[in-house]
Image (tube, helix red, strand yellow):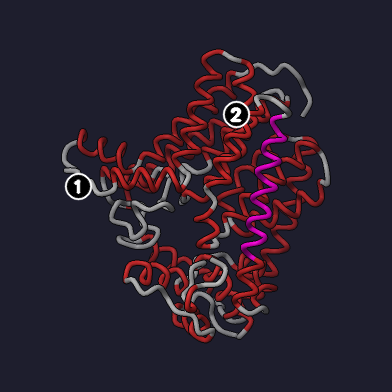
Amino acid sequence: MIRASRGIITTCDFGEIYYGARCVLHGSDPYNPSAALKEFTRDGLAFPTDSFNSKVDRIVIAVGVNLPTALLLVSPLAFLPWSEAQMSWLSLTALFIGVAAFLSWKLAEGRSPLITASLVCIVLLNCVQVLWVGNAAGIAVSLCVIAVYLFLRRQYEFAACVLLAISLALKPHDSGFLWLFFVLAGGALRKRALQTLILVVVFGLLASVWVSRVSPRWTDELHQNHILVAGPGGTSDPALTGLTARSAVSIIDLQAIFSIFRNDPALYNPMSFALGGGLILIWAIAVLRKKRAYESTLLAIAAISVLTMMPVYHRSYDAKLLMLTFPACAMLWELGGKKGWFALAVTFAAVLSTSEIPITLWLMVCGAMHLTIGPVAGKMATGFLLQPVPLILLIAGCFYLWVFITYVPSTSRV
């Protein structure tokens, strides 16, 4: 993984950020595909020999879709040779994922330790793909989980602000609604959230000025690149015709389901925004109205960690954010009753369905099926068999949202 065989790139997602940052350092446009490919070939690396992976990796490297803040964050590594930069990035990713998993277990405060440990082990055993491609979600999600732990425990709070700001700068769609929770929660948590926002704004301005020197129209170019990769047959096309559909890193948001019924972005995008955004709006209102307590805080965080993946683009490695559901699951299991059993079922289902080993096994069974997508019944069967993850996450998100809304706090710690 770290030493690509015969100079063939494997960590293409990290390569996209790395070579984008090198473009800026060398005075070329990081959002110009030809400039990015030129930086890549200058290092003497090659794409995989098989046509499919070669096509995917070439698009990923060439068509930059990362924000300037991500490029600026990686710029210190861009001064290093590729092999050393790659090793540093993968080492940091593995370290942060391990720390985040441990802290998600500690947030449960000793409740149902065997269940929490089992969930953590499933996550850790299914991190090969995020390391193989070097996606920034490994670091962004992990830093978000670490920051949540530090905020709730009120430890090293300024460091937590920095970590959450880095997470937002790398992948705002992963940690943005977790940041919103702290804003809505009020008190000291809101203060820390606003301090984080100041760091993000300052960092964003610096990154924008830095990139604008070589790409004055970077906002337009970035927008066009997103349209390109999300178009029909693209690497980020949520439909079954997408280039990365039926893979271990398939898209898991609601667009993947709605596209089965009608493969038209003008339809499936608004529907995803409406359903996912509506659930998040209900959650936000509940956060504002609910009495603050540690248990309800865990439930609110569990709900939004799932719901945040519903409206907009997310892949299976972004679902490491489900680590924030473990404390709530352990708490409900300890309380017993039907809620405890259902919490256990939906949490394990969500984690397993977004883990690469179960996904690969499922695709081996169902991926080769040629289903007739006819009337509604056929499309529903296709959805359940070939795109089960968004449905499972939707059920899990609705469950935790319902429990959060109906939960009566027993303490007032947080």
For residue 307: magenta? Answer: no
The residue drawn where x is 57% and y is 65% is 67
Quarter of the picture holding the C terminus: top right
Q: Which mark is residue 389?
A: none
Q: Is residue 292 above or below residue 262?
A: above
For residue 99: magenta? Answer: yes
The residue drawn where x is 65% and y is 43% is 101
Rounded to the nearest whole Å, what is the CA distance between mark 2 and mark 1? 37 Å
Task: Check disc 1 and report its element: helix, strand or loop.
Answer: loop
Q: Mark 2 points at which residue?
A: 115
Can see residue 221? no
Q: How crowded is mark 1: few (under 14 residues within 10 Å), some or many (20 or more)?
A: few
The residue segment tinted magenta is 89-108
Q: Residues within 10 Å of mark 2 (few under 14, many from 20)?
A: some
Can see residue 340? yes
Q: What residue type is labelled 2?
A: Ile
Q: Is residue 164 above or below residue 205?
A: above
Q: Mark 1 points at which residue?
A: 370
Q: Residue furthest top?
A: 337
The residue drawn where x is 32% and y is 47% is 364
Magenta segment's dominant SS is helix
x, y percentage for residue 112? 65, 25
The residue drawn where x is 73% and y is 45% is 193
Tell whether 321 sits left or right of 279: right
